[in-house]
Amino acid sequence: MVTVAGRAWELLEQVPDPEIPVVSIRELGILREVNEGADGELEVVITPTYSGCPAMDQIEHDVRALLDAHRIRARVVTRLAPAWTTDWITAQARDKLRSYGIAPPHTTAAQNVVQLSRRKPAAEPVPCPQCGSLDTTETSHFGSTTCKALYKCLSCLEPFDHFKPY
C-alpha cells in the first residue's frame, strides 16, 4: 500500500523545472524530501540551485498546485543547508540536458573544491552538446540563468549553456 507521502513523491516527480522544462525538479535534485508530519500534514522540502534563485517561487507554486489538485495537504519548506550541488543531478537529467542543448556539469562538487594556491587549476573542456567537440570557449560566465555559463563551440559555431558545477 502506497502511503500519502509516497503518492505525493510520485506526483512531484512530474513537476518540471520552470527554467528547463525537459527535466523535473526531482531529477535536478531540487526536490529533497517528502515527510509525514506528526500533525498528519506532509512536508515537502525543496532546495534552490543557488541562494536567490528566481525560479523557487514558481517551483513552490507548482508543487502546491499539483498537491492541491490531488487533495493532498502539504507545507513546502525551502531548505538551504546542505547547499544544493550538481552532484544531485541524476544521470537521466544529464542526458536530457545534453539533448536539450545544455552541457551538463562533468565534474562533481568535490572535484571543484577551491584549493588555496597561486595557480588556478586548468578547467576541463566543456563538450558541445550539439556536435560533441571539445573545442569550446566560455563567452560569458553567466548564461540564460545564473546557474549556467554561456559557451560557444569553435567547431560548429553554435552557442550553448553549460550548467556550472557547484
Image (cartoon, rainbow, N blue to C red):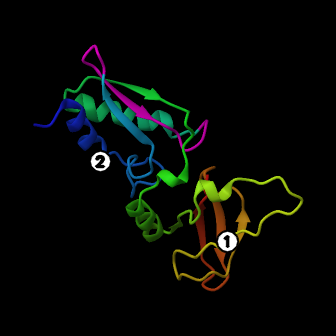
Q: Residue furthest bottom?
A: 155
- In this rendered view, identify the residue nearer to me: 50 or 130: 50
Determine crowd level at label 1: few under 14, some 14-19, many 20+ residues with C-alpha closer than 10 A. few
- Which residue is pictured at 72% across the width and 61% down the height? 140
Locate the N terminus by quadrant.
Answer: top left
| Residue 78 in magenta stretch | no
At label 1, which amino acid type do we have? Glu
Start and end of the magenta stretch? 37-52
- Whether residue 74 sits left or right of residue 98 in the image: it is left
With respect to residue 145, does 153 lie above or below? below
Q: Which residue is mark 2?
A: 14
Secondary structure of the residue carrying tag 2 is loop
At label 2, which amino acid type do we have? Gln
Q: Which residue is mark 1?
A: 124
Residue 114 x %, y %: 74, 53
Q: Nearer the viewer, mark 1 or mark 2?
A: 1
